[in-house]
Amino acid sequence: MYRWCGKGPDGQCSNSKAVTIGDFQAGSLPKFYMGSRCVNDTTAVTSSGSYVRLWVSFDFHRNAGSYVMQVCVPAILVVCISWVSFWINRDSAPARTNIGIFTVLTETTLMTSTNRQLPPVSYVKAIDIFLGTCYLMVVLALGEYALVAYSNKKRKDQMKRWEKEKKRLEKLQKEQRLPQPDIIAETSDEFQLAACTCPVEHMATEQPLLLEPEKPRNISRIDITARIVFPIAFTIFNFAYWLVLLYRADRLTDPIVEEGCVEATS
């Protein structure tokens, strides 16, 4: 039977004294810091018999400071840049399209480079949720301009049809205002045309109703809504994301020994 035995102050065996770690230098592993360590023993059952095994596990935590400065902050700035298109004139298609495509490509590059540095795992990581949301925000900003362009084109088509209908009705109104001559018939076989004797100001003609559509505004309502909705939604996401992340990552930085750890698999 094998057991961990480190002499404690009282001279008795103690697991906490069996494995010791010297001063952990932060510069030796820049992306990790030492967490806890677990010392325990287990029994391995094989075909030849049962054997006692001693094991120790070291817990390293990933240092999130470098990822915050190299990944999270640039991703947030790229999302903010995508909102600049909401203040650009909707008729400036090249400017708004270039901003949208630039932000989408930048977020794609950030996601690809970050996943290349991290070990491949089968579950969704916290950084994947953050970058995925940032990518969704810039894609929605680009889609917002597509909606604005479609609405603008539809509005222009309505104005063209309205102008055409207005000209037709104005022409019809002018024709109805012309005075009509009186027809004076002396006999059934003879008639003559006399000048109009009815006052023009008393002529009652039925005027067609011309409904003028609402004039298009200089600033699209879609852009005004996007200027408010996008920043508020992204702010709420960041508040909830970092709050949950800090709560879930509440771990001790000092190396401590956990006794009575869960036994390792045989």
Image: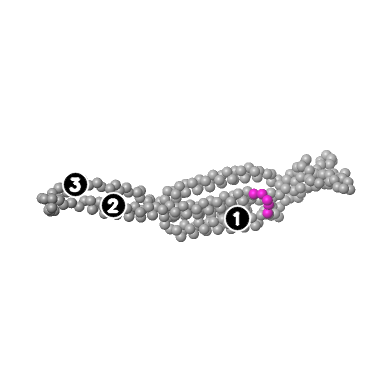
Q: What element carries label 2?
A: helix
Magenta highlight range: 120-124
**How many callouts does the rendering have?**
3
Residue at screen point 87% across, 48% down: 47
Asked whether 5 falls inside the magenta stretch, the response is no
* Image quarter of the N terminus: top right
**Distance in Å between CA atoms under marks 3 and 1:** 77 Å
Residue at screen point 59% across, 49% down: 130
Q: Which label sits on residue 111? A: 1
Q: Give residue 150's position: percent from left, percent from top.
A: 44, 54
Could you tell me the amino acid type at mark 3? Met
Farthest residue, direction left? 186
Is 47 placed left or right of 35 in the picture?
right
Q: Which label sits on residue 102? A: none
Decide which of tag 3 and tag 1 comes sooner along the chain. 1
Q: Nearer the viewer, residue 111 or 93?
A: 93
**Distance in Å between CA atoms under marks 2 and 3:** 19 Å
Residue at screen point 26% across, 54% down: 171
Question: What residue does disc 3 label?
Answer: 203
Residues at circles 1 and 2 in contact by the CB criterion of under 8 Å = no
Decide which of tag 1 and tag 2 comes sooner along the chain. 1
Could you tell me the amino acid type at mark 1? Met
Q: Is mark 3 on a helix, strand or loop?
A: loop
Could you tell me the amino acid type at mark 2? Leu
